[in-house]
Amino acid sequence: MRRIYLESVLGLLTCFIVGLFAYEVCVYQLNTDYEYIFQDYEATAHQQLIENIANNQGLEAAHQAIRLFVDTTRNTLLTFKPNDKLPTQVSEFFIANPNIFIFHDDYRELWFRLSDSQNTYHYQPNDDTLVRQKIELEDDLIWVFFIASFIVYGIGHLLIIFRRVKKLENATLRFAEGDLSSRAETSGGSAIGSLNKSFNLMADRIHSLIESNRSLTNAVAHELRTPIFRIQWQAEMLKDTPLNDSQKKTIESIVEDTEEMEKMVDELLYYAKLDSTDLENLQKPLEIQDFLNHAITRWNKDTQLNIDLSLPEQPSSILADETLLNRALDNLVRNAMKFARSQVLIEATVHQEQLQIAVHDDGDGVAQEHQARLFEPFYVGDKARNKTKSGHGLGLSIVEKICAQHDATVEVGQSQTLKGAVFTITIQLCNNSAM
């Protein structure tokens, strides 16, 4: 937005300067300056009037008329006698033009001579007079008003652009946070050229693409369940028939594969469901000590590993959907169980009004090149995880989506405690816990 504002203001200033320059060239350089001609006419008339007074009433009367004119017009009279040195420009002009008795210098100040006098007279503005000081003040005020008007225009222009860009930014943020119905206003008072319409067109296409993807995912997952069930049923039927050892192993392998496919379909459906579930009304205060103590009992029953739990000293509660948070932690803990050698640590700590739940394992950890993409759907870091343990690549993606629904974050790193991987969920404490 700052760039748009600067470009518009600089563009306006450039146009103004170019306009002034073009006016100066066209009016004063390429054409005759008629204002100067009119000044020459006035000076000639003035010189002739003084000349007539000198001829009819004498040179002294002409001098009195000159002094009266000087006093009335708030000028200063400089009289140069024949032996006085004139400015070079004035002297050269009168020598070159002996029949011309008036001359305006570069400052448009009048120099004139009388035919019966060898003196040269010069009218110089008296800047000490109140009238001329007022004139100079008015000339300066022109620039003050110009600069003030330019500043007012710039601030007004900035506010208009800021208001319009802010509306578009808010619509963009709402869309980025998952409100796919968010659109930018296209009215004349809110639009930034065609940018708002372009954003809405992009949002419509993205919305359509996401909805199509969701529908396809749900349809495929539901349709896969029927053939998977049939394969499982037929395999179970075959197990009851007379088979040799090789055939039994093959049937058992088929059953295991179909069970794995069934789990993948369930995860796929759950992952798709997270995009359309509104958790706002499902969240409630959750006491983290009771929640984790209850969960670790279940985890200990499913593994021979040592699972340790570290809780904060003070009771802490968060605003969360218990079912979804349990699913997220269950995915992390069972993921740690797969890759731990002997120990898993679940550590809950409070830092700056936030609760951090870290799941450590003493496995090989996650290589740095895989950490950035580990939460992407179906991504499996083969170098970091054994293929037989890595699953389908949806478990961690589900964790990230659940965290996003709770305005929480999940990160992966190297455990300083067990030297393996550590996955950390950070979520805001409830107000009463934060206090």
Image: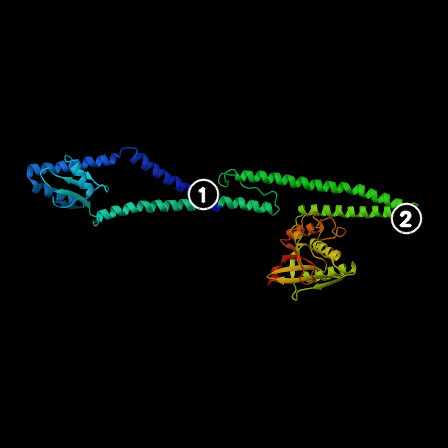
Mark 2 or mark 1: which comes first in sequence?
1
Crowding near the residue tagged with mark 1, few <14, some 14–19, many ≥20 C-alpha atoms within 10 Å:
few
Kind of residue indicated by mark 2? Asp
Residue 230: which disc? none
Q: Residue 86 appears at what percent x and percent y?
A: 17, 44
Question: To which quarter of the image does residue 359 belong?
Answer: bottom right
Kindly report the distance in space between the C-alpha atoms of the residues bearing marks 2 and 1: 80 Å
Residue drawn at (89%, 47%) of the image: 246
**Quarter of the rendering occupied by the C terminus:** bottom right
The amino acid pointed to by label 1 is Glu
Q: From the viewer's perspective, is residue 75 above or below residue 300?
A: above
- Asked if one can make out residue 110 in the rendered structure from this viewpoint, the answer is no
Q: Secondary structure at mark 1?
A: helix
**Whole-percent x and y of residue 175?**
59, 45
Residue designated by label 2:
245
The one nearer the camera, 206 or 243, is 243
Residue, disc 1: 7
Q: Nearer the viewer, residue 20 or 280?
A: 20
Question: Nearer the observer, disc 2 or disc 1?
Answer: 2
Would residue 218 be seen by someone viewing this image from the given angle? yes
